[in-house]
Image: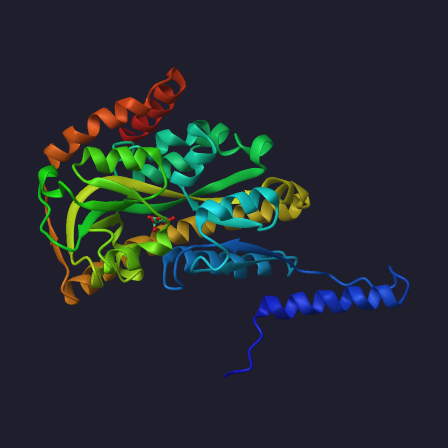
Amino acid sequence: MRAYLSRSSFLAISATAALALSACSGGGAIEQAETRTLVLSLNQTEEHPSYVALEQFGDDLYEATDGRLDVEVYPNETLGAQQEVVQLVGDGAIDMAVVSGTQMENISPDFQVLNLPTAFDDIDHQLRVVNDETIVGDLFTSVEDSNHLTVLGGLTQGSRHVYTAEGPIEEPSDLSGMKIRVQESDIHIDMINAMGASATPMSYGEVYTAMQSGVLDGAENNEISYMSQNHNEVAPHVARTNHLVGLDYVVMNTDLLNSLPDEDREIFEQQWQLASEHHADLWITETEKVIAEAEESGTTFNDVDKAAFDQALRPVVEKYLDSPEDRELFDAIRREADQ
Ligand code: GCU
């Protein structure tokens, strides 16, 4: 085994040593700059664009703040599944996390509109919306008082598709009787049921084993998650249902964010913006790459009767646009598509 100390462990130790020294000398005698290493929870692997972009965010932040701030990404659900982790960020036990829009929907129904099929035409449209303060500004600060969570911004999940052990799936009736995993979200349960399957909510990390053992007949996700979670090994039929452009959020404990000195907060926000652009670039190249790898591994991709799926999903969209505020937000999102 290689003796290895990551930069942040080293800094954590240096900071502790500096504090100890300062305590020994009666305090205040030694002034040592400390690095505040922000712990960020992620449920993806180290190859995933979110890991790569957020690790880079940490390095760039460290440099831009002369070592005052850093971000350490904990991948693979090591700190817990998103559902637990989002609570821990609110409690201040974890500093930051990437959580799916579906988890934010469980914190506040105001987030539901952005989780609806047909909200976004494509990734470009979605990113224009999440970077438009006039559309999402209030939403992103809406759970600060209630849950101590600030949404820094969005990271795309790309287009989501259904994949199954047996296939091909071409129309809604082909999904009849199939148990398809969904995220823990009312919208996603309704969505997959409307598409003809039987929705089974489950956390991300459990899906592979559930498909392997036959508890599930399939799942739905983007191509990058499909390959990075090795779902191709147990569900080799991907139907290009393109039923939704999914959205992740980077959330941070509000008190922690507010405690940053003005200068560091400004740098933090600038670097975050660069990280989100980096992520969007990585997303495109990684998607192309993994589709080729999936095909090489034996996965078949097929087109579907898109009109039939769209028609099945229409009532679900209507069901969740049940207040004037939701309708207004949805319309603002749709207007951005026509820009
Ligand atoms: C995507 C998304 C994750 C989410 C996962 C899921 O991979 O980026 O945030 O947890 O889908 O289906 O659970």
Which residue does the image show at 30% across and 59% down from the upper left? Answer: 209
Task: Say whether residue 273 is visible.
Answer: no
Which residue does the image show at 68% across and 45% down from the upper left? Answer: 261
Residue 279 x, y percent position in the rendering? 39, 52
Residue 93 x, y percent position in the rendering? 60, 50
Instruction: Give the mark count.
Output: 0
Task: Say whether residue 322 is visible.
Answer: yes
Closest to the observer: 259 or 84? 84
Reply above or below: 234 against 4: above
Closest to the observer: 99 or 156? 99
Reply above or below: 156 against 21: above
Closest to the observer: 305 or 82? 82
Reply above or below: 14 against 128: below
Residue 242 left/right relative to 339: left
Residue 111 left/right relative to 263: left
Residue 210 x, y percent position in the rendering? 28, 55
Residue 222 x, y percent position in the rendering? 27, 50
Q: Residue furthest bottom?
A: 1
Which residue does the image show at 54% across and 49% down from the upper left? Answer: 96
Residue 38 left/right relative to 82: right
Which residue does the image show at 16% across and 37% down from the upper left? Answer: 196
